[in-house]
Amino acid sequence: MIDRIVSYASQGFSSTAIASMVNTSPEYVEQILQDPQYKSLILTEQQKFATLKADTELESSYTQLEKRILRQVTESLPFAEFRDLTRAMETLIRRKQQLSMHEHSSFVVNGNAQFNTVVLSIPRAAAPEITLNSQREVIAIGNKSLAPMQAGAVRSLFDTIQKKKEQALLSKREQQTQQMQQYIPRAVDVTTIPEDF
């Protein structure tokens, strides 16, 4: 709980807001915030947050600059020489490859699949508590535990889901067939047709 209080305080939340988020009294939060040990932690977290914010703003600036340059290149294409177009194309391809490698969640290195972690920037107040095991794998998020399954169990689960979908589809088709049969006129009995017809 203290970690969350420090985290929220470093993001600038008031002690009343922090107290409601961690379900405690504002007095207790104030007591923690006045402790010199926690004050230094809050200051450190504020510096980390400021650095992260500056990095995000810098990346945003680069992205905006890149868009403006691409727009200018696109507008000047009819007047460009072949070597300039080739150089611009190579630069764009290189940048696109860098972005795609960064965006993909996994790629193969020396025959082994390597998985990257996706980093999301969300306010700490909105982030749930995450519990890790000894191998640093997520085993719980908030008060919900994650139950890892073996590959066979996952396949079995998907097979069961597929069978249920197929059964639901068959049932729906049978209902549609029955509904259609109600509207189809019954076969006429030849014996009831008058002879002078």
Image: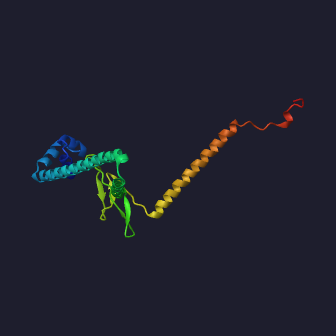
Above or below, 53 relative to 117 = above
Residue that extends furthest to the left in the rendered view of this protein: 36
Residue 158: image location, x then y, percent:
50, 57
Residue at far top of view: 196
Does the image show residue 4?
no
> Against 120, is 27 above or below?
above
Quick one: 27 or 113, which is closer to the camera? Answer: 113
User: Viewed as shown, does residue 35 lie left or right of 104?
Assistant: left
In the displayed image of the protein, which residue is found farthest to the bottom?
110
- Tell how many labels: 0
37 sits left or right of 172 in the view: left
Q: 25 or 115: which is nearer to us?
A: 115
Name the outermost residue toward the right. Answer: 195
Using the rendered view, name the quadrant where residue 191 is placed.
Answer: top right
Residue name at image x 46 percent, y 60 percent: 154
Question: Where does residue 185 sit, x and y in percent of width and height?
Answer: 74, 36
* Residue 158 in view (yes/no): yes
Q: What colouring does the structure picture have?
A: rainbow
Query: Residue 130, how many percent across, how many down?
Result: 30, 55
Quarter of the rendering occupied by the C terminus: top right
Q: Image point 36% across, 47% down: which residue? A: 77
Task: Classify residue 190 by image quadrant.
Answer: top right
Q: Where does residue 132 sit, x and y in percent of width and height?
A: 30, 59
Of 60 and 116, the residue lying toward us: 60
